[in-house]
Structures are given as C-alpha cells and as structure tokens.
Amino acid sequence: MSVVSLSTVYENIIERIEKFTVSRNWKIKSVLTLTFLSLFFASPQFSGYEKTFKEIKGWQAFHQQREHPFTALNFNEASNAAKRTFRLTVPILAFAFHLNDYAIIVFEWLVNILLIYFSLLLFEKITKDKTLALFGTIGFTFIYIGHSGFTDNNAWFDVVAYLFLLLAMLYSNIFLIFIFTFLAAWTDERAVVASFLIFLWWKFNEIKTNDFSFSSFFKLEKKSSTVLFALICYSIIRFLLSKVFDLHTPDKGIGVEVLMNSIHAFPLGLFSALEGFWLLLIVCFVVLLKQKKYSVILSLAAMMFVLLLIAFSVEDITRSAGYMFPVIFISIAVLVEKISQIEMRKILFVCALVCFLFPSYYYASHDHIAVWYKPVFIKAFGLF
C-alpha cells in the first residue's frame, strides 16, 4: 500500500471520528464499545469462579481480610497473599456492604468501565480535542491497565487503585485529591510510589514546565502538597495499625534476588507496562531534551526508574509496572503545549494502533510466566 493510500485511509479515519464525536452521547457510546471490544479481545474467565474462589491464595487472603481486616494473614511469607496486610480498601468495602465474591467480580467490572470513562474525560480535559481524547482512550483500554478489572481472577484489585490515581489527576478539588490518593494507598502499596507521579502532575500544573526547576519541589503549592499530605496521613495510620494490631508486611520474595532473576524479562516486562504509549514518552523526552528542560526530564525519569525498579524486584512485573501509567497523561500534557494538533493526532493514533494490535498479556518472573489474555474467538476455537 502506497504512502498516499495510507494517508487517505488516515484522513478518512479522522473524518469519521470527528463526525462521531459531535454525535449525541458519543462518550457513552465510546465507553460501551470499548468495553465490549476489551472483553472480546482480552476475555476474562467466564467459568470456574467457584473453584477460583476456593483455591487461589489471593481470594483466601481476601476472605480473611473481609471477615477480620486487622488480623495478620497466615500465608507463606514469600507469597503475594501474605503481602496484602495493609491493602484494606476493597476488603473493608466488602465487609461494610456485605459483598460476596461474585459481587466483588461485578464491582471490579464496574470499576473497569469507570476507569475507561474517566480516562476519556481526562484525555479530553488535557487535549481539548475529542479526537485526541478518543485515540488516547482506545490505547489506554487495550493495555493491561485498561482491562485489569475484567481479567483479574486473583483478587489483586489493581483496577481500583488505578481508578483512584486517575481520579486524583482528573479532579482539582484538594479534598478529592486527598481522598483518592489516600484510598489508592490503602489499595496497594505500589500506588504509594505512583502517587509521586500524581505529585509531579499537579506540580507541573501549578508551575508550568517552562518555569519548572528543581527548586520548584520546595515551593508549597496546594494541590501537589495535598498529595504529600495524604501519603503522610497514610503512613501515620499504617504505623499505628502495625503497633496496635501487630501487623506487618513480610519482605520475602522481593528484592535483589528477584531483580536479578527478572533481568531476562526486561524487554517483555518493560513493553507490557505501556505498550504503544512508549512512543509517546520517547517523543516527549526528545522534545523536552531539545528545549533543555532537564529538570522535567530528570524528575519524570527518576520516578519511572523507581517504579520500574520496584516492578522488577517483585514477581508481578506487568501489574507493578502498570502503576507508571500517569506518565501517559503527563507526557500528553507536555506535548500539547509543544507540538501541533495534527502532529499530536498522528502520534496518538500510532500509539492506539500498536496497543490495539498487540496481544494483551501479563508477565511474571516467577517460573517465567507470560499469560496471554486470549480473545473470545481463540477460546471458542479451543473448545473444538
């Protein structure tokens, strides 16, 4: 196919999307369509839940926390289940509203749909362009983060933490920023580290990237400081719980040994975090480098490095690295001020296309597991 033909196809896609985004309820239509496509191309486990609830250690840990949230977990200290001591958001919610296991599955699906919807709102808020917002949401839906609630059968509840982090970026009310950051921290400890990306997000909003310097970290601004205050409150309460109820998180199964064992998985594990959006980050860093915005580059790179170091120091590489997703929105916020709308559309179109075409999978260093979330038609074919 010639370059002219590809250009024509691209222009036709843009024209159709622009017509679609002026239609009534286009956001609801987009979310429902993307939800269906996500379930189709990364199909969850539709059967065998009863066996899953009984046999998977993650669900056993959830059952114990739902009944006795402030009691130490009795599992192998190297296991994921033993490390859930302070991941209390969903168990306490299930306790408060008397949610059984099937209700929790429905809850995760609903949260995943909300994640897609609010990501669309955030993309539109940043870009002020409906076409760009749709491209961004399409890409977001087809990476691990975008289907983590549909395909979770281990009671990980990462989708809940992802949603809280995204909402902490979307809403500028300091009370909401505090609540969402605080709840994300109690959903998974990786959200605590990811919250520093939320801090950077608000710092870049309060002090534009053109004016940002390392000294900016020491300027007290309301929204970015609220993120830090939420983390301080979380840390104090966690410390008190550990003393009063003798709770702790074991450190076995994490660290240098796991990191060295995960080196072989670096290319696959790294790509699985953001897939096509790595292109967006590369463009963002190149643009910032050309403009000599070294403080912005180093701040983002340092936070990404810490999150990736944590991801490869535990066995759950893809889901851990997924907590890096705020850099997608930060990169777009940087680029929309630096490059034209036409160029931005082309970049996000390619990002979305790569995310859509690349199979959805999950990588863990334990036994070198790469799980493919198979499309419905592959599972159907397997029945024969």
Image (cartoon, grey):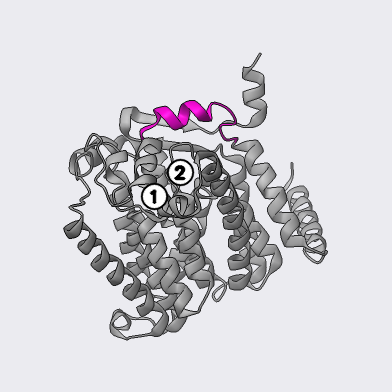
Secondary element at tag 2: helix
Residue at numbered disc 1: 321
Numbered circle sitting on residue 272: 2
Residue 296 falls in image quadrant = bottom left
Name the residue at 61% across, 44% down.
Answer: 356
Secondary element at tag 1: helix
Was residue 148 drawn as part of the magenta stretch in this picture?
A: no
Name the residue at 23% across, 43% down.
Answer: 254
Q: Quadrant of the C terminus?
A: top right
Q: Is residue 80 visible?
A: no
Alpha carbon of mark 2 to alpha carbon of mark 1: how far? 8 Å
| Residue 194 position in % (x across, y down) | 37, 61
Location of residue 355 with respect to 164 vertically, above or below: above
| Residue 245 position in % (x across, y down) | 20, 54
| Residue 104 position in % (x across, y down) | 52, 45
Name the residue at 33% across, 35% down.
Answer: 365
| Residue 119 position in % (x across, y down) | 58, 61
Name the residue at 33% across, 69% down.
Answer: 299
Front residue of 30 and 338? 30
In primary-sequence order, the first of circles 2 and 1 is: 2
Query: Pointers 2 and 1 in contact (CB under 8 A)?
Result: yes
Front residue of 202 and 57? 57
With 279 as the anchor, is 364 left or right in this view?
A: left
Q: What's the amino acid at mark 1?
A: Ala
Q: Quadrant of the N terminus?
A: top right
Q: What's the amino acid at mark 2?
A: Ser
Q: Which residues are magenta?
A: 43-57
Location of residue 202 with respect to 132 vertically, above or below: below
Location of residue 151 with respect to 235 vertically, above or below: above
User: How packed is label 1: few (under 14 Cα within 10 Å), some, or many (20 or more)?
Assistant: many
